Amino acid sequence: MIDYTPSEMMIVTAARALVGVRTVFVGVGLPNSACNLARRTVAPELELIYESGVYGARPARMPLSIGDPTLISGALSICSMADLFGLYLQGGRVEVAFLGGAQIDRFGNLNTTIIGDWEHPKVRLPGSGGACDIAINAQRVFVIMRLRRRAFVERLDFITSPGHLGGNGERVTLGLPGSGPQVVTTDRCVFHFDEETGEMVLSSLHPGAELAGVRGEVGWALKVAPDLRETEPPTEEELCLLRERLDPEGLYR
Amino acid sequence: MADKLMSMSDAIATYIHDEDAVAIEGFTACICFAAAHEIIRQGRRDLTLCRMTPDLVYDQMVAAGCVRKLIFSYLGNPGVGSLHAIRRAVEKGIPAPLELEEYSHFGMVGRYLAGAYRLPFFPLRSYIGSDLPKVNPHIRFVENPYGGYGKPPYGDGSIAVVPPLNPDVAIIHAQRADRDGNTQLWGLLGVQKEAAFAARRVIVVVEEVVEETVIRSDPNRTAIPGLVVSAVVHEPYGAHPSYVQGCYDRDNEFYLRWDKISRDEAATRAWLDEWVHGVQDRAEYVAQMGQGTWERLQPGQARAGPVNYGVYR
């Protein structure tokens, strides 16, 4: 059996979810590794879009920020942020977007703004960036974040980016263009969302993860898919690409 | 052609006043730290700072006590973590309380666009279902006057709007300009053009001052015309520790180091004393950083092929 880290498991699982996708809105860190891995494995047609105004990036090194100059050299197009958010995102050209957050609830709503009260914050987080716009306009949202009790909460302190809101089709009622979060990839398991209710459902456990342990990290009564599976561990090829080509310095390992 | 070339110190003294709304733009790239440091040195107070990503540049200005309010969309040290000086101001009121007005990225882009187009508002498909409008009364919803058809992709009625943003001053860093301020930039374009057209006064800061003929040889690359520019400042390495495409890389070591420095109020003050108050201008900062820094940040060459504009007589 091959040794791998929880982060590598997350990256590989997130990459596989991109099978057949053409355009992905990438974040720095784990999503960046996942998207670059997917382009070399399950989604050879994949074009990487970065909110800084980059379409079709071919980063030659691990980008250290969303606007790293390695994303510009060799890209298909560089545009203003007005064009990126107006023509690409709101124009409906983004198939999948990766998001994460400090808190997520059972409907995939995300908080990246504040812990505590907005007027009197305990912790001031970065805020929306493009996340709110992305959550509303991307065709599908894939969430990637570590499974922690303080992050998977019954009630968000602040909704920065709407997921399925209160569930039961509220996105559709409100006329949001994108279909919202589809999958949540964590370091221990994968969740999908019930098509009717919009509620998060545990769909697979990574090798070694226990159902009880996952439940213990989730702040609500977790629903479990009847066909709960074990996630396929990373293959040698995936790990080799990650370690030797994409992140040789191990920044996100 | 007017000659608007002046020193940074003269440009800041002439065009930036206490209580101004100032936008030092540039998304990750081309962030004019040189101008920010001169504003700190000249002791400007009660500024309203506008910027999509306040970045280290506004963290330093907040720590230096220049700022009353921030208008922004992402308050982080990009790729590293928090902006600790700003957090200290927001969470603890040190050195002074800081008012926040926050948007999403598209909301900030929309504000600059409305400002530049002289529109009363900019509509965008965002904010529905988000708590942002609850903490920012400037984000509002209007009914689509052409509404009622309820069909995708346009929705059936309500759409978010944001008001115009017209900063008193925009400061734009770029690769090159002529002495009139016709400015060419490449790499990330951010909201540089929109912010410049929205602002009442524009200071352009460049790595290289070139002849007008250089600008005219490649007009597609001119983002900002001299028409809207008040001052041109020649300041090599003026965007360090951020980067300028093709000129120097981001000094990521510094971004990581700032994370440690800025956690401590005294260390932050000591850094400002040494690297801002302790130097006379950017040239001295560049000299003190030392040649090793600039060699470390020097990128390799990747030249674009020339295009033919044609001669039409």
Image (cartoon, coloured by chain):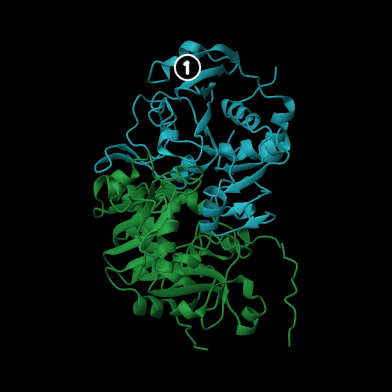
**Which residue is pictured at 73% across the width and 26% down the height?**
A236
**Which residue is pictured at 53% across the width and 83% down the height?**
B179
Q: Is residue A206 above or below residue A122?
A: above
Which of the 4 image quadrants contains residue B245? bottom right
Which of the 4 image quadrants contains residue B196? bottom left
Residue A216 position within the rendered picture, expressed as x and y whole percent measured from the top left: 42, 16
Q: Is residue B57 visible?
A: no
Which of the 4 image quadrants contains residue B237? bottom right
Residue B242 position within the rendered picture, expressed as x and y whole percent measured from the top left: 52, 59
Q: Residues within 10 Å of mark 1 (few under 14, many from 20)?
A: some
Q: Going by the picture, which residue comes out furthest to the front?
A: B149
Residue A158 position within the rendered picture, expressed as x and y whole percent measured from the top left: 33, 37
Chain ID at mark 1? A
Residue B158 position within the rendered picture, expressed as x and y whole percent measured from the top left: 37, 46
**Which residue is pictured at 45% across the width and 82% down the height?**
B6
Mark 1 lies on a secondary structure that is helix
In the rendered structure, the answer to whether residue A107 lies left or right of residue A39 reads: left
Q: Which residue is mark 1?
A: A214
In the rendered structure, the answer to whether residue A207 lies left or right of residue B79 reads: right
Residue sitting nearer the eye, B50 or A30: B50
Q: Write down the colour of chain A.
A: cyan
**Which residue is pictured at 47% across the width and 50% down the height?**
B257
Q: Is residue B88 above or below residue A42?
A: below
Q: Amino acid at mark 1?
A: Val
Q: Is residue A18 above or below residue A149?
A: below
Q: Write down the colour of chain B.
A: green
